[in-house]
Amino acid sequence: MKKFSGVFAVVAVAAGMFGAPAFAMQERELVEVEPPAYPRAAERREIEGHVVVRYNVTPDGVVDGVEVVESAPSGIFDRAVMRALEQWRYAAAAETTEGVERRFDFNFGG
């Protein structure tokens, strides 16, 4: 996986900063996080944007039923976010946590 040499890419995924209601985040601890990779084509063209997703977390902590709620520019960063979420794991719970929303920002900064 490509690292960001020479480019500082900010991908906001901090728990609680964007997205899920406080009660949902308190119920499930995020134990494995894989940040989305900045797509090479977007990086080369210096495209910035964001993706907002909504998903459920199964009782065994797997992210499931991911849907893109918003993305700008459309379709540029969606796949990177979906691939990253496949790697995420939450703490186990008695039941499914539904409707977790999270925003991922893709920015160049310094």
Image (cartoon, helix red, strand yellow):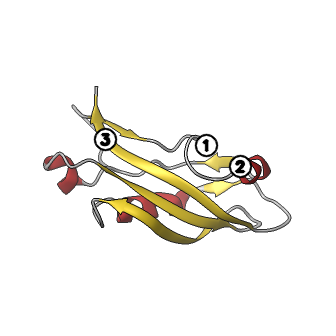
Left or right, residue 41 beside residue 65: left
Residue 92 in the image: above or below residue 4: below
Say which quadrant the C terminus sits in: top left
Pinpoint residue 43: horizontal percent, then vertical percent.
20, 47
Pinpoint residue 27: horizontal percent, then vertical percent.
79, 52
- Residue 25, numbered label: 2
Return the residue at label 1: 15
Q: Residue at x 29, y 47 (%)?
A: 2
- Identify which residue, 19 or 84, lies in the foreground: 19
- Residue 107, numbered label: 3
Q: Residue at x 54, y 54 (%)?
A: 102
Q: Residue furthest bottom?
A: 65
Residue type at the position of mark 2: Met
- Identify which residue, 50 or 5, lies in the foreground: 50
Alpha carbon separation for disc pair 3 and 1:
18 Å
Pinpoint residue 76: horizontal percent, then vertical percent.
28, 62
